Amino acid sequence: MTDQTASNSLSVAGQRLIARFPFVPAAIILVVLLALNGWFEPRSLSFGALRGLVSTYLALMLLAMAQSYVVFASDLDLSVGAIVSLVNVVMVTVMQSLGGDPLMVLFACVVGIAVGVACGLFNGFVVAALRLQAIVATFATSIFFTGIALYVLPVAGAPVPEAFWLTYASSYFGIPFVFYVLALVLVILTLLARSGLVIRILTVGDDAMGAFHSGLPVTAIRIKGYALCGLFAALAAMCLTGDTASGDPLVGGQMTLNSVAAVVLGGTALSGGKGSVLGAVIGALIIGLINSLVFFVGTPSEWQNLVQGLAILGALMIGVLVSRRAQK
Amino acid sequence: MTAMPKLQLNGVRKSYGATKALRHGDLSLDAGEVHVLIGSNGSGKSTLCKIVAGSVRPDGGEVILDGQPVEIGGPQDAKAKSIGIFYQELSLAAHRTVEENICLPSLPLSGPFADRRAITERASRYLKLFEGVTGEGFALDTPVGHLREDQRQLVEIMKTLATEAAILIFDEPTSSLDRSQVERFFAVLKQLKTEGRSVVFISHRMDEIFEIGDRVTVIRDGETVGTLKIGDTDQAKVIALMVGEGATPRSGAEAKNPATTIRSDITPRLSVSGLSGKGFRDIGFDVAPGEIVGFGGLHGQGQSSVLRALFGAAEVAAGSIALNGNSVTPADPRAAIRLGFAYVSGDRGRDGVIRGRSILENVTPVHLLRAGQRLLDPADLKQKARPALEALKTVFAGYDQPVTALSGGNQQKIVIARWLVDAPQVLLLDDPTKGIDLGAKADLFALIRKLAEDGLGIVLYSSEDNELLQNADRILVFNGGRIARELAGDERTPYNLYHAAYEAA
């Protein structure tokens, strides 16, 4: 009897913990994956290796953040990858035509952000105002955005000015630039989690009809969610551009579903109304660590995709089991 | 004369397709009064409230606020015009906390950020009004999804109060509350009255209406039929107004379908005793071969839950079910179908019609299950489907026509035909005529009577009292998940039905 009450109060505590911090199961998986990586390849936990991990996956983390704000409202954006590509080629083209002057690079970044937000607003208009199905509508806009990207830069390979990618790869006061970005991202997501807008986005995702009845401007809120998504997709494009140091009109395409997977791995419900952006960031890292673990374990190259897929399924299952257990 | 009314509705109308939800809604609401709206299921009360709250746009009629004709463009507009509403179906976000939900309509912000302190402060002001009656596990930071039904209703009440609107509409705010919670709520309403606020209050509990109301407006079949001062009237008068004059003892309707004399020596088709589950308790009744037993009462008193439980679609916690004298346990719909249960739901979209498929495919699934066929011969299936469809006088162009091309009434006939290919033992009808036109209804009930004459046991739940009075041999009136009263023979009058349904549980 006392055993049962003890386990009950424990599960109540677990339930509260996960209700408050839905990313807890993801964080546990992250720690396990880090440990496994270290087990199979001790050097993978070195400062340099972690820096490499962050600089490779920073773009995906930001893209998962972007996707979160849409998923919160129970929408979906299948065009985030195409937005990344478009912003990438627009920025590279602007930098190329204006020269590598730091001021011009900054200007190119501003243009990139504007393009990202514009794409987001367009998606929001199509989905929330015209009321087209989010999945198919954003699939269509992704093709559309890719089309523009191919028009802007038909062939991959245009180089990025040194001022840009050197900054991304450099260190300040002994700390790599990407770590500053990561810290900034964490600060921004904490602040955004407290914003009235994100609370409203979550409310809409919870029960759109209820939100409408409560007098919330549901359409405007959903459009703002897509705009936020576009903004963070543009930031993701900047990181990707810093990492790859070139323009490529198709570079973001495969990141779209990775971003959705990262959001779900982070404990966010695709049905909306519930989740955490930090979870999505952790989810992106989980995908990165799985990829590197598959490599460190020494999987033959022809089997790597298969093992990767199974490992992501496994991580998803563990996440579900942990949260279910806590809710029982 | 008294001062100008705060809000006035004149001849407000609203139709959904062919259904006229509100034909002629009038309402005159004064400042500082609690005005009760009453009417039977589907009489148009909620539609009237939603028009005032802006979530439904009227097709015609006048809305006058503070003497000025206005158009309420949407919930946001209603909020701007100082109108707050408690939604019967609740408008809460399950994953948000109690305090966030209370403050959601106008979230306190400091800059772009939610002002946590202001949210807690404002929410606790309204929580204080219900201190001591909120029950276990109710705190400002509890996610609403973790709360019980009555607690969620309290949050919706607090959310409505937090709008601080001059006009507050409460659409069945007390349906899940216990006595102490209702008392506290009424104390709050009385306080609002002294502040000069106007309250519209909908409830089905007569005692509550007479306890808190100043005036009562009665709506019948989408029309306002009168407004009375509570002090000048009594329950019988209000019920008489709801039922309508001349409707009181309508023996003519029953004579058309004289109650079949049931011989007690015949084994009942269906015999239920002590059945309990989610939403119903201790239900017991028999259905003889050839009998139509009606389930009556207000909407959502457990009628549908009992039918779904009998069909194996809802869990049964206790009790026994016997079919032709043999004890059975329909664990899921497949088992129930094999035993000989048939279930027709009014919610065709969810439970009945297979959208986008042909008529033939919509008629045959039950037959395929019962006959256990694996390989199909369409010609043979058409042979089997024909008598069932002919019996229903279904008009259709061909077996391959998509079922959604038919009208609502004809779709429902197709769904019923599905059960007639192999004769069932018991037919469970769960508000089968929802959204069906009058002509099709008459056909349906003629068919149901004919099926009864063939020896089926039929249970009919209808949210329209007239359908029950005209078609059921006996009516079991549900109230709060229990059978409150059984009406048989001459007792089957609109008055008795209303009275039993509206009695405090």
Image: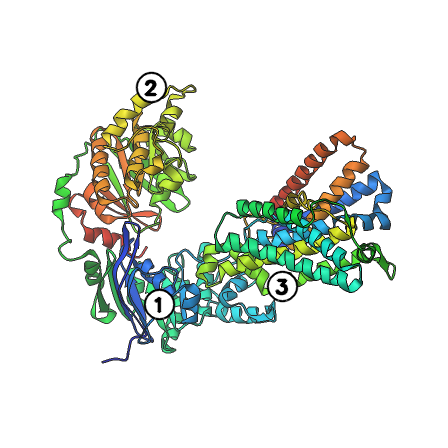
Callout 2 amino acid: Asp
Instruction: Give the quadrant of residue B61.
Output: bottom left
Count of marks placed on residues: 3
Task: From this view, report whether residue B293 is shown above or below residue B369.
Answer: below
Circle 1/circle 2 CB separation < 8 Å: no
Q: Is residue A56 left or right of residue A23?
A: right
Residue type marked 3: Arg
Instruction: Identify the image quadrant of the N terminus of chain B.
Output: bottom left
How many residues crowd around disc 3 within 10 Å: few (fewer than 14), some, or many (20 or more)? some
Specify whether disc 1 shares its chain with disc 2.
yes
Q: Residues within 10 Å of mark 1 (few under 14, many from 20)?
A: some
Q: Which residue is mark 1?
A: B71
B79 left or right of A3 in image: left
Task: Report whether mark 1 lies on the same chain as mark 3.
Answer: no
Report the chain holding disc 2.
B
The outermost residue toward the front is A97
Name the residue beneath numbered marker 3.
Answer: A194
Whether tag 1 and tag 3 are in contact, CB under 8 A, the answer is: no
**Between B222 and B292, which is closer to the camera in this rendering?**
B222
Residue type marked 1 = Glu
Q: CA distance from mark 1 to mark 3?
A: 36 Å
Nearer to us: label 1 or label 3: 1
* Disc 2: which residue: B380
Where is residue A243 drawn, in percent x and y?
78, 50
Q: Inspect this view and state whether residue B400 appears.
A: yes
